[in-house]
Each structure stands twice: as C-alpha cells, then as structure tokens.
Image (cartoon, rainbow, N blue to C red):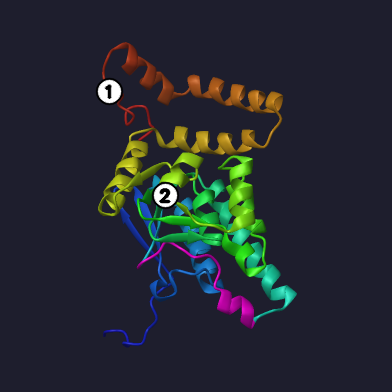
Amino acid sequence: MNPPLDTPSPPVLRSDAGGIATLTLNRPQQFNALDGAMLDALGAALDAVAADATVRVVVLAGAGRAFCPGHDLKELLAHREEAFVGDLFARCGALMQSIQGMPQPVIARVHGIATAAGCQLVAACDLAVAAADARFATSGINFGLFCATPAVPLSRNVARKRAFEMLFTGDFIDAPTALAWGLVNRVVAPAELEPATLALAQRILEKPREVVAGGKALFYRQLEAPVASAYAMATRQITEGMLAEAAAEGVAAFVEKRRPNWRNSGSA
C-alpha cells in the first residue's frame, strides 16, 4: 500500500554506498532550518552512523537551494520561554559535539548559504567542501543576537580576528574567502560539488579504519590540552600505532615499494 500523499518527508535522509553514509538535511522549503524535529532526527542519525562499523566516512549535505540557514527563527519566536530556548540550544550544542566525538570523519558538502547555526555546523564538521557560490555568515548580530554557540567551533577553525569580524558584523563571506580563512578545505564549481566531496571521502576510505578513528579522537583531545600534555598523549598513541599491524603493513609496503594491503593487516 502506498503511503498517503500528505505523509511528511523525514527531516533527515540517509543513504549509504561503499562505506560512505550521506545524511541530508531535508526541509528544502525552509532552506533546511534547524527546528527541534530536525535536531532530534540529525542527532539520532549521527548516533546510528557512529555505531555502524560499515560506515567509514560521513557526508553532511542539504536538500534544495541551501545547506542550512541556522535555527528556525519562527519556532524560536513562538516559544520565548527560557526552558524551551535553553533546551533547544543545549541539544544543538550536544549535536555539534557528537560530530567531533564519532569515530568517522564528517565532511560538510556546502551549497547556497550556511549561516548562524548552519555555519556552526560547517565549522563543527571535520572537513568541508563548498560550491563556489556558497556563502557563510554568523548573522545573529544583525537581529540583535550574538552568535555565541556558533562562535565555539568558528573560533577553532579560523583566526581570532577573522572570527570576530564575522561575529561582530554578521556579513557574508564568499567561498574563496572561507577557503582562505580555513573554514573549508575545497572550493569547486557547483556542478563538481558532489564528485569533489566523494573524491575526498574516497581518499579517506583508502586508509586504515582504526588509524583514522584513533587519529581523529587524538586530534581533538590534544587540541584543548597544554602542549606538554598534548605531546604526552600523542607520544603514547604514536608508540602504540607504530607497534600495531596497520603500521607494520604500511611501513613494509613503503620499504618494498608497493601499495599497502590493509586487508591483510586487519585494517580494512
């Protein structure tokens, strides 16, 4: 039996292919604004992917004409109570941290606009590929609201004065500027956005799963630690890594001038 024609589309779509899970924000009529239902759906999708050993890389995309304009302002205006608003922002912050905490690298595939919490989402992802016509802003200041939560990952991606410029003016920056400032990794023609993102994901797929996962976790742990502690963590991890099967196979392949066979090392 076919579903009723008025059955609402799910707020987040998931598709899997070849070890890559693509999560697509799916409120195209609202430019994928993050309402409570979408936050919950995206959080659940990320949790499911994080626990799925068949997924090696995650791509986060938006349906329709934009990536994400941030929170759904109509929803926030309709619920001007501290409990509701505070809970919504707390859930959003937890979602951003779950991206950092999951073992798979997460790539934002950005087109159209990524503003406020949408820009926060790009900054929270490990990597980002943008279409040449994409635009980014932390625009809350234009509405009398400092983008406090987007400032957290933004200030960990771009230089301090660049972050302040975005946060204090609310002005858009274009994709080449976002690339120069360190917010994204690649800028490509709009028609090349999907294949360029796939190519980056494929490069990661070539590497041993557990080495990528361990490296991501170490990167974020050491980032906030004092230098001496960061070196201590890194020394432990690289020592363990050098003695593991993946490095044994990789180093042997380099010495023998051949491609590594990660499957034989138990790392595929």
Q: Is residue 105 visible?
A: no
Q: Is residue 244 above or below residue 70?
A: above
* Quadrant of the snapshot with the N terminus: bottom left
In the shown orientation, is residue 230 left or right of residue 113? right
Q: Nearer the viewer, residue 222 or 16?
A: 222
Residue ID for mark 1? 259
Q: Is residue 139 above or below residue 123?
A: below
Residue 10, horizontal then vertical, whole percent: 41, 73
In the shown orientation, is residue 116 left or right of residue 63? right
Magenta residue span? 64-78
Which amino acid does the dot numbered 2 rest on? Ala
Dominant secondary-structure state across the stretch colored magenta: loop
Identify the residue shown where x is 33% and y is 11%.
255
Residue 128, horizontal then vertical, whole percent: 43, 47
Q: Look at the image and say whether residue 245 sits in the magenta stretch.
A: no
In the shown orientation, is residue 100 left or right of residue 146? left
Residue ID for mark 2? 175
Q: Is residue 204 visible?
A: yes
User: Residue 157 is drawn in which quadrant?
Assistant: top right
Q: Nearer the viewer, residue 216 or 33?
A: 33
Dot 2 alpha-carbon crowd within 10 angstroms: few under 14, some 14 to 19, many 20 or more: many
Identify the residue shown where x is 40% and y is 46%.
57
Residue 150, horizontal then vertical, whole percent: 60, 56
Identify the residue shown where x is 63% and y is 52%.
151
Residue 82, horizontal then vertical, whole percent: 74, 74
* Quadrant of the snapshot with the C terminus: top left
How far apart are the two marked residues, 1 and 2, measured between alpha carbons? 36 Å
Mark 2 secondary-structure assignment: helix
Which amino acid does the dot numbered 1 rest on? Arg
Dot 1 alpha-carbon crowd within 10 angstroms: few under 14, some 14 to 19, many 20 or more: few
